[in-house]
Image (tube, rainbow, N blue to C red):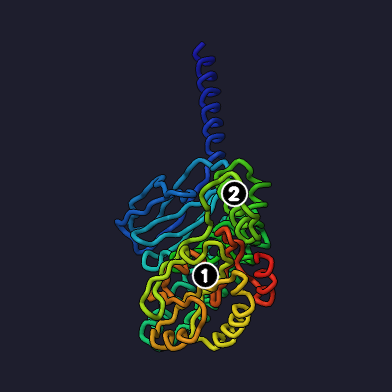
Amino acid sequence: MKQKALQLLSVFGMLLLLCNACTNKSDFTVTGVVSGADGQMMYLENVGVSSVLTLDSVKLGSNGKFNFAQPKPGSPEFYRLRLNNQWINFAIDSTETVTFQADAGTFAISYMVEGSENSKAIKNITLAQLDANQALNKLRKEHEGKQINDSVYVVEMQEIAKAYKEVALKYIYTAPMSTAAYFALFQQIDGMLFFDMYDRTDSKAFAAVATSYDHYYPKSARSMHLHNLALQSIKVTRAQKEINLDDVNVQKVTYLDIALSDINGKEVKLSDIAEGKVVLINFTAFQTEWSPALNMNLGELYTQYHEKGLEIYQVSLDTDRHIWRNAALNLPWIAVLDPQSVYSQIAALYNVKQLPALFLLDRKGNLTKRIEDIEKLEADIKKLL
């Protein structure tokens, strides 16, 4: 009887071990060593679509070893290890074991990662993003110190973003269903996304990742988020259809109003001059080399179509008010100055990434399109007139 009881206990113990093994198989593990962090707290965090959740923490010892285990997510998810104000981003899409080796002083930039190819890619993307931010900070100091003018600042800023995109696009188009592609899409520079949803070229990157996530992870929160962003991007980058206002007594507009001062110091609102007219909104800078040629083209269009209902509302981002005023004196259309220059909040709201930028409003106040090809501008105006 005693022997039988021992056999039963033995079988029960084996079952417990098997159950534990089954549980462990549904976990992912994050392990590694952080040198030079004796006595410091390190945290494992889940980076969600709209929030960051702390999952676990450990007080690092003299050997710097750590080990975290968490349930595998239902779909690919992002996490980070946080030490003070530095963090290492990584992704989990299975029950993998990801191993890190880092130093407390350079925790976020010089770590090594094994066990996850996507996490290796995320490291490369992070370094490209950090390079871009450092380059932008240097550029901004040069601009604020008057070492470079506005046009050089804008051009150099575009080159910085382009360098990041060259790294990011390798992952986006090679494996759009990967966590690395998703991560690359949402990195920022100076608080703004590198990839502009309202830019026709960048919109394709959003669509590629969104389509893949829809296919591979149709129920996940990230897929739905991407799907909505991609639809919004497509809607804006395509010419909008006319809104049916037959049964509506009030006028609806789809543009953001602008209220800036002209050369006489008088505030001119876009909404005051837009009613019943086709309006060309132009963000520009008179200090640039291309400005005279652009204004000549606009002058020809204004002369030919102003009497038929065309108005031009030109927003200058020049830093030199004297240069702007002298140039604007001879312009027949509405010319206003944004004193915030290249830091313009209005330009940011219109998602202006480069100059010149042109937008068209129809007679009902609908923002119909962003002009991509200035050679087709006249044809676009004629359609609305």
Q: In front here: 163 or 17?
A: 163
Q: Name the kind of residue labelled 1 in the image.
A: Val
Q: Secondary structure at mark 2?
A: loop
Q: Compute the Cα span from label 1 to label 2.
A: 29 Å
Q: Secondary structure at mark 1?
A: loop
Whether 220 is drawn above or below 312: the answer is above
- Which residue is situated farthest in the front direction here? 307
Could you tell me residue 17's position as x and y percent? 53, 31
Residue 352, disc: 1
Tag 2 residue = 245
Q: Which residue occupies 50% across, 83% down?
A: 331
Q: In front here: 46 or 13?
A: 46
Could you tell me residue 217's position as x and y percent? 63, 45
Whether 113 is drawn above or below 146: the answer is above
Could you tell me residue 296's position as x and y percent? 59, 85
Q: Which residue occupies 54% across, 85% down?
A: 291
Dot 2, how many residues are within 10 Å of its Cα: few (below 14), some (14-19), or many (20+)? few
Residue 83, disc: none
Q: Name the kind of residue labelled 2 in the image.
A: Leu
Instruction: Determine if residue 120 is in view.
Output: no
Q: In this image, 243 relative to 41: left or right?
A: right
Which badge, 1 or 2, comes first in the chain's sequence?
2
Q: Which label sits in the foreground, 1 or 2?
A: 2
Q: In front here: 383 or 233?
A: 383
Dot 1, how many residues are within 10 Å of its Cα: few (below 14), some (14-19), or many (20+)? some
The image quadrant where one finds the C terminus is bottom right
Instruction: Determine if residue 289 is in view.
Output: yes
For residue 305, which quarter of the picture?
A: bottom right
Q: How many marks?
A: 2
